[in-house]
Amino acid sequence: MKIPTTTRRAILLGSAALVATGSATSAFAQEEMDEPAVGDRDVIVVTAQRREQSTLDVGINISVADAEALKTQRIEDATDVVAITPNVSIKENVPGLVPVLTIRGVGLNDFSATNNPSAGVYVDEVSLSSLALMNFDFFDLERIEVLKGPQGTLYGRTATAGALNIVTARPNFRGVSGMVSGSVGSYALKEAEGNLNLPVSDTLSLRFAGKGIFQDEGYWFNESLSRDVGRRDVVLGRAQALWEPSSGFEWLLKAEVQQGRSELGGGEFFGAVATTQTPAGVTCPGSPECADSLGYADLDGDPFRGAWSVDPSYDMDQLTLSSRIEADLGFATLVSVTGYIDFDRQWSADTDATPFAQLDFRSEDDVEQFTQELRLSGETDFANWTVGAFYSHDDIRTTYAGDLSDLLNTTSFTFSDQESSSAAVFANAEWNLTSSLSLATGLRYTDEERTNLGATTDLVSLAPASFLTMAPFGSPPIDLAVSDAKITDENWSWKLGLNWKPADNTLIYASATQGWKSGGFFAGVATNSAQLEPYRPEKLVAYEAGIKGRLRAADLNYSVSGFYYDYSDVQTFIREDIGGIPVQRLGNVDSATIYGLDADLAWTPLALPGLNLHAGIGLLDTELGAFTAGTGPVPAGNELPDAPSFSFHGGASYEAELGSDIALRLSVDGRHQSSSFKDALNDPLIKADGYWTLDARLSVFSEDDWDVSVWGKNITDERYVTQAVNQLSFGFGYRVYGAPRTYGLTLTKHFN
């Protein structure tokens, strides 16, 4: 599926750019719709419940970023979703790779391509089956929706944490339109984007979109290579066709390709013991200035500088095909959503973060998935209802070629081939008890089967012997861990809730929801077959109550919700020593409890035209039950990984006219997360401190014509940890940092 460079550039130049329409606030953005009445501007239409509704009619905590907010805040991939809502965190297990989304403390403390996200991720209603599929860049989007709490009685896969709905801009019949955009920025960044909407007839419309990211300088400097790493060369293209032969039928076809020929960064090393070079006052273990067992220490004081020993190249190819058919049957509407994804990538991880080959791995991941969903929905005087069925099949193959030569005098090979089939039926209804009170009910049955064939093998490839198995050189490869197993999970998910609208602009809701995530198999490097034993499904029962509305007199939108989660069989990593070797095992903790609060405000005062303010806070308290690790029993009371107790996002934008057709807009957005642990053991050495980031953008523009913007992200150059791993039994560990300060200039031209 490799696309030649000349062809990629041609695709890019022949496409058009990111849509820039809608409101300037992320929590209360506005989709294209008829001009709202004064006092209602900022009330938006979403499809969180698979029908068009105002957010004030949806009894779910939901945050939305429209096209304008995505552009203003440069929300460009999944790692940026934290900018639009509190109580959400994202980490990358490898710098530039494997993003994991955690919502209200419920996430997936894993890195394997074979694992499903705890938060369901949907692109145009097609669910993504693998963590590997989260590595993509956003372009030509209509909006992003973040739903908190278990989902599954309405569509797609079940999810315990929530759902991330990504909605691309689709073709329309409003005439030929589009835009082109180009950016230059720090780290030798060059970007080009474009889109073109092209009605061919009264019944057929096409849309083409593309984006190219060419960053010729990386954030990181690799002393082993004597150059920067983290360069990017990414091209994305999308073509859609919308056919509407009659008012009651539409068929949307989409084809999308993504190709990356980029590089990854490296984690910051930390060591175990002090040496003569360790500065006075440095505490060992846990600091970069401490050394590992081979005497390496990182003394430069720069978390983006290291001496990594692996090839930084990251190659990725993806093809996505989807079909959405909607037909009005009179008594109901039938929707069919079909999706196919073919994805492969190659990358390396230096998990010792040193110039030595201690725990270096070259990985290849191949994902092939097919999904089919059918929904029938209708409305009567008594209820809005939906019934549906969902089927998915995915085949995920992953390998790790390990170089342990400097630590254990050997090389290894790990592979996993996992196939999963899932079938589900679901029903959801909102019953009108009175004109202002409704009862929400939902039920889902899921039957899932998963097989795993995998192993880790010591290749005994170096003389005189492997120090991993003590086998002499010349011995045949030795299997350390083997799995050939099948698991079957059957489960019920459900929802029961009340929605009360005491006034048109106010919704008070309460619900109890049960979500479920299937069990599976660990697919990483294992030294004992016990590590490859399947982990159990996890279950979460969520209780939530909230109020949302608009105070017209104050021009204020608000949303506040409190929640309590009863969490069972929590899937998480537990560090253990098996056979004298420290390993990470993906298993279950019997129970956990979570409670907290989400609050969002958006103020668009009519008395101060052009001013928009928005803010959100998240409060979170999490507690794991007791479990057993390699160090012995761990009592109840530990916090869940990646669950900061306080999070905040907020911003302001101001727009002023400079002339009859020219305006200026200044936007500033900030984000804060308090400290958080990175494993179930609550290891203080890899605890991430709290941090603040600040972004800004200044634009001069002519509405629907042109735009010139200067922007900066993390403009205070905050150095903050997003992930960390402790392997001090080997003498080392590493920390992954968020991106440093970046800035640039963007020119955009619209045409109609």
Image: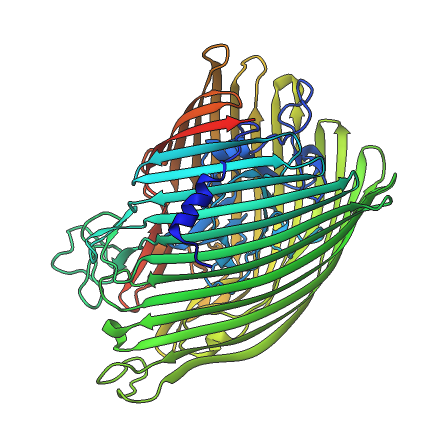
Drawn side of residue 522 relative to residue 461, left or right: right
Drawn side of residue 321 relative to residue 391, left or right: left
Drawn side of residue 46 relative to residue 500, left or right: left
> How many numbered marks, from 0 up?
0
Q: Camera-side residue: 689 or 485?
A: 485
Does residue 349 appear in this view?
yes
Which image quarter holds the C terminus? top right
Q: Residue at x 36, y 52 (%)?
A: 262
Does residue 631 appear in this view?
no
Residue 192 drawn at (x, y percent)? 42, 38
Q: Residue at x 75, y 27 (%)?
A: 504
Residue 641 in the image: above or below residue 555: below
Q: Residue at x 21, y 56 (%)?
A: 225
Residue 23 drawn at (x, y percent)? 56, 27
Drawn side of residue 516 relative to residue 21, left or right: right
Residue 431 in the image: above or below residue 614: below
Q: Camera-side residue: 624 or 191?
A: 191
* Residue 212 falls in image quadrant: top left
> Which residue is at the far left?
276
Residue 741 in the image: above or below residue 485: above
Q: Camera-side residue: 323 or 682?
A: 323
> Which residue is at the far top?
660
Residue 377 drawn at (x, y percent)? 79, 47
Residue 341 drawn at (x, y percent)? 56, 58
Q: How is the image coloured?
A: rainbow
